[in-house]
Image (cartoon, rainbow, N blue to C red):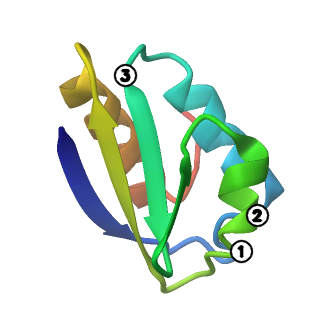
Amino acid sequence: MITKTVTLNNEDGLHARAAALFVRTANKYSSEITLQAHGDSVNGKSIIGIMSLGAFCGEEVSISAVGVDEDEAIESLVNLVEDNFIEI
């Protein structure tokens, strides 16, 4: 299992668009993805779960992955958050 903590720097935090991009990226991997904020953990492949965290700009979230492609999953998801959910 790999866990990385990142800070949400995008203006709206984990709003609907950002949550959808996170889920779309997470679903590219077979690893189990977990997102944690405020002491709550949710499935990183569930848009409803992610939005229920209520994580806003400036807050830290922890992303965990466990599985055969956990390294790639974490790298991709951390990059997505650090790039303020801008798809290239």
Which of 65/74 is in front?
65
Residue plotted at (37% across, 22% down):
31
Task: Give how far across and how far down residue 80 sits, in percent.
Answer: 46, 46
How far apart marks 1 and 2 lie (CA) works out to 6 Å
Q: For the residue carrying disc 1, how many other residues have a C-alpha within 10 Å: few (<14), some (14-19), or many (20+)?
A: some
Q: What's the residue type where badge 2 is placed?
A: His
Quadrant (top left/top right/bottom left/bottom right) for the N terminus:
top left
Rendered position, 43 above or below 40: above
The label nearer to you, 2 versus 3, is: 3
Residue plotted at (36% across, 46% down):
79
Q: Disc 1, disc 2: CB below 8 Å?
A: yes
Q: What's the residue type where badge 1 is placed?
A: Asp
Is 9 on the left or on the right of 31, as rendered? right
Q: Name the residue under label 3.
A: 31
The label nearer to you, 1 versus 3, is: 3
Quadrant (top left/top right/bottom left/bottom right) for the C terminus:
top right
Q: Is label 3 in a helix, a strand or a loop?
A: loop
Q: Name the residue under label 2.
A: 15
Q: For the residue carrying disc 2, how many other residues have a C-alpha within 10 Å: few (<14), some (14-19), or many (20+)?
A: some
How far apart marks 2 and 3 lie (CA) works out to 23 Å
Task: Give how far across and how far down residue 39 sits, in percent.
Answer: 45, 77
Q: Disc 2, disc 3: CB below 8 Å?
A: no
Q: Name the residue under label 1.
A: 12
Rendered position, 32 above or below 39: above
